[in-house]
Image (tube, helix red, strand yellow):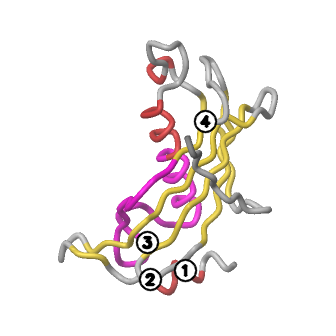
Amino acid sequence: MSRVQIELPDEWIFETEIDVRIGDINYGQHVGHDSVLSILHEARLRFLRQSGHSEVDVGGCGLIMADTVIAFKGEIKYPARLRVRINIGNWSRSGFDLVYCVDEVSDTKRVAEAKTGMLCFDYNRRRPARVPEAFRAAFPA
């Protein structure tokens, strides 16, 4: 079976800590895959907020997730505190990628790596939009 490989950057532009909730735990007694995606979503919202943006407004348009990939590196148990780091790149006319690294704070054990492809979207016209220049300029390479 081939495994997904996510290319991680050398530096990160955002970092936050998120506590695992009891509702994140599945029947296997660890955090479920759906909850990992929700944790990434929370980190993404915090990242956007710290730069003065939101998922519904990144300078004139909103965002939708075009794709996602998560590579699990270890189990996450309750009660863990996670450190989620984010970087942005791979810009295109209408979107960009967010890359995530998730570690347990207590022992710095890597538990997940992920990438979400984000597409700028005009919700009024129901179609993709160009990345706003001001948004792109806020995150120089």
Mark closer to the chain start, 2 or 3: 3
Q: Is residue 35 magenta?
A: no
Residue 128 position by quadrant:
bottom left
Confirm or deny contact between disc 3 and disc 4 (CB under 8 A): no
Q: CA distance from mark 2 to mark 4?
A: 29 Å
The amino acid beneath tag 3 is Val
Tell me the residue that label 3 is attached to: 58
Between disc 4 and disc 1, whose residue precedes?
A: 4
Q: Secondary structure beneath disc 4?
A: strand
* Secondary-structure class at tag 3: loop
Q: Which residue, given by chain and number where applicable, does mark 4 sit on? A: 18
2 or 4: tag closer to the N-terminus: 4
Q: Residues within 10 Å of mark 3 (few under 14, many from 20)?
A: many
| Residue at image mark 2 | 132
Judge whether 32 appears above or below 118 on screen. above
Q: Which residues are magenta?
A: 41-69
Residue at 57% across, 46% down: 2
> Would residue 82 appear left or right of 65 to someone viewing this image?
right
